[in-house]
Amino acid sequence: MMQLKMIPGAIALLAGFAFQSAALAADEPIQPIKPPANINLGMVELGKKLYFDPRLSKSGFISCNSCHNLSMGGTDNIPTSIGDKWQQGPINAPTVLNSSLNVAQFWDGRAADLKAQAGGPIANPGEMAFTHTLALGVLESIPGYVREFKQVFGKNKIDIDQVTLAIAEFEKTLVTPNSRFDQWLLGKKDALTADEQAGYKLFKDSGCVACHNGEAVGGNSFQKMGLVEPYKAASPAEGRSAVTGKDADRFNFKVPSLRNVALTYPYFHDGAVWDLKEAVQIMADIQLGQRLSEQEADDMTAYLESLTGEQPQIVLPILPPSRPDTPRPEVKS
Ligand code: HEC
Ligand code: HEC
């Protein structure tokens, strides 16, 4: 009986260990990125072509990849994007990497999902400056596309729904699993240096995870930019209030994913900050009212750099050629 008495404690201890390692990742406020699932491969291939095809723009020069360059973390690495006729937009281009994990698309969340988003830039006068009708006219004039759309969607006519569905399906594949941090979450304890682990602990303890959490380390809520101290933005954008019409939503922006943040400079919706460490210090100041020491800011930055995952391995698509009767690009005004 004496022995039995001791057993429950020992069992609880052992069970505790087993539970801890199995549930290690689940207990953390951040989860590893999962590889894409349930992907329609034919649609992905078509969507990839459309993503890289500048003929969806009025000038015949700008593709999705111009501003969301997959060689550069899915961004353009400039403060605010340059579109049709060299127009400079009002806001920084977020990465397309892991965008399928976002609660909604755009800084203010005005598009519900990737499909709803994908039609926007084609017809945006400051971006690709085309219309959906004209873009469809171009695609319909290219025999290679007519064949491929028919193969994928089984319909005789190309419509904008098919275009945006295919692009969204391709974007679903643009996830970046297996970062060193994810390996650490999954139990590989030497995947992070001591500084990076200290940075992660600080990221949790100081409250960054209140907003930057989940699989994407962000992307799942709208929060005030300048919660404790105001942020002097270089952009006129007012955020979520543009969608809800509510004054309380002014300067609420979608919390960006911090996955691959080492690649997606410059930072913030106005693209005003080029240095990740400076962005970290600003966040601590204006969101949490905390002044980080140099060491703390260095550790946290080192941690954020461990969030760079495996980049999508893209084989550059060869686009089907235009025909003599394909509507021509309009480069002049
Ligand atoms: C001229 C540059 C430009 C082009 C071309 C462009 N985008 Fe964007 N993209 C942006 C900017 C800027 C934003 C942010 C706009 C905003 O939030 O108001 C954005 C936002 C997005 C987002 C939302 C990401 C997020 O986290 O909210 C996705 C997804 C996206 N673009 C995909 C595409 C696709 C697909 C195409 C091609 C059909 C495309 N973009 C073409 C500049 C561009
Ligand atoms: C109250 C919510 C909140 C907290 C807490 C918070 N953030 Fe943020 N974070 C945001 C929002 C919202 C943005 C986007 C703001 C903008 O650009 O207008 C952002 C942007 C960032 C960016 C820039 C990402 C990019 O791609 O532009 C970094 C880096 C960042 N946060 C790191 C941190 C760190 C580190 C902490 C803790 C010290 C932290 N954040 C705390 C909400 C928060």
Image (spheres, grey):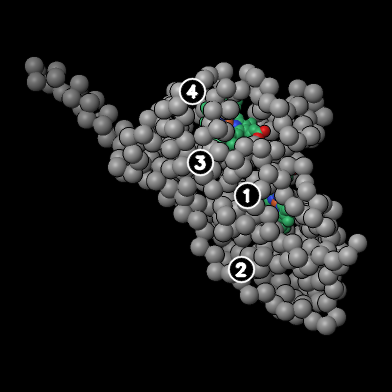
Dot 1 corresponds to which residue? 77
Q: Is residue 239 above or below residue 97?
A: above
Look at the picture and state if 181 lies above or below 204. Answer: below
Disc with the residue nearer the chain's start (3 vs 1): 1
Q: Residues within 10 Å of mark 1 (few under 14, many from 20)?
A: many
Residue at 27% x, 35% y is: 18
Between 230 and 295, the residue placed more toward the observer is 295
Q: CA distance from mark 3 to mark 1?
A: 23 Å
| Residue marked by disc 2 | 45
- Name which residue type carries label 2: Glu
Identified at 83% across, 77% down, the residue is 326
Instruction: Residue at 61% x, 42% y: name it.
Output: 266
Please tell me which of labels 1 and 2 falls first in the chain. 2
Callout in the foreground (1, 2): 1
The residue that mark 3 highlights is 215
CA separation in Å, label 2 and label 3: 26 Å
Residue located beneath label 4 in the image? 292
Q: Residues within 10 Å of mark 3 (few under 14, many from 20)?
A: many
- How far is the residue under mark 1 from the one under mark 2? 26 Å
Asked whether mark 4 and ligand 2 are closer than 8 Å, the reply comes as yes
Ligand 1 within 8 Å, label 3 CB:
no
Is residue 171 positioned above or below 259 on the image?
below
**Is disc 4 surrounded by few (<14), some (14 to 19) or many (20+) residues within 10 Å?**
some
